Image (cartoon, rainbow, N blue to C red):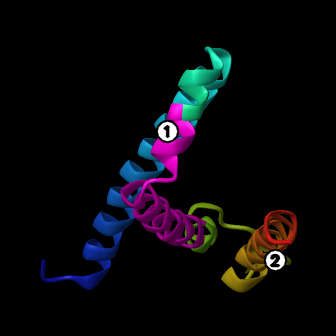
Amino acid sequence: MRRPRYCMVFVREVTAIFVVAYVIVLLSLVVSVGGDPESYEAFRDFLASPGMLVFGVITLLFTLFHSVTFISLIPRGMAVWRNGKRVPASTIAGPGFVVFAAVVAVVLLVLLP
C-alpha cells in the first residue's frame, strides 16, 4: 500500500475481527455457565490455557487500538459549527478520550486488587 492512511484504515478494520472473535468467546462462556458445572469448569480451564491468554492479550491490544481510532474519527464524521466556525477536532474527540480513560481506570480498579 502506498498510502499509510489507507493501511491504518485496513488495520483498524482487521482489528474488528478480533473484537468479534472475543464476543464469540464471551457468548460461549455464557452458554457454558447455563450448562452443567463440568462444562463450565472445562471452559474455564480452556480460557486459562496459554493460547487463550495470548489471544486475550492480543485482543485487548487490538480492542484498545480500535477504540482509540474510533474516537479519533468522530470529529471527521461529525462537523460541529459554532458562531460560524468549525469546532476543533480536539474539542469533539477530547471528551471521548476522557470517558474512555475513566472507563479503563474503573475496570482496572475493579479487576486489580
Q: Nearer the viewer, residue 88 or 45?
A: 45
Badge 1 density bin: few <14, some 14–19, many ≥20, Cα 10 Å: some
Compared across the picture, whether 30 is left or right of 62 comes to: right
Which residue is at 57% across, 61% downward? 77
Instruction: Look at the numbered disc 1 and give the secondary structure of its residue.
Output: helix
* Position of the N terminus by quadrant: bottom left
Which of the 4 quarters of the picture holds residue 94?
bottom right
Compared across the picture, whether 85 is left or right of 43 comes to: right
Q: Which segment did they paint magenta?
A: 42-70
* Position of the C terminus by quadrant: bottom right
Which residue is at 37% across, 49% downward? 17
**Distance (Cα) linking label 1 and label 2:** 29 Å
Numbered-mark total: 2
Q: Which residue is mark 1?
A: 25
Is-magenta flag for residue 73? no
Q: Which residue is mark 2?
A: 98
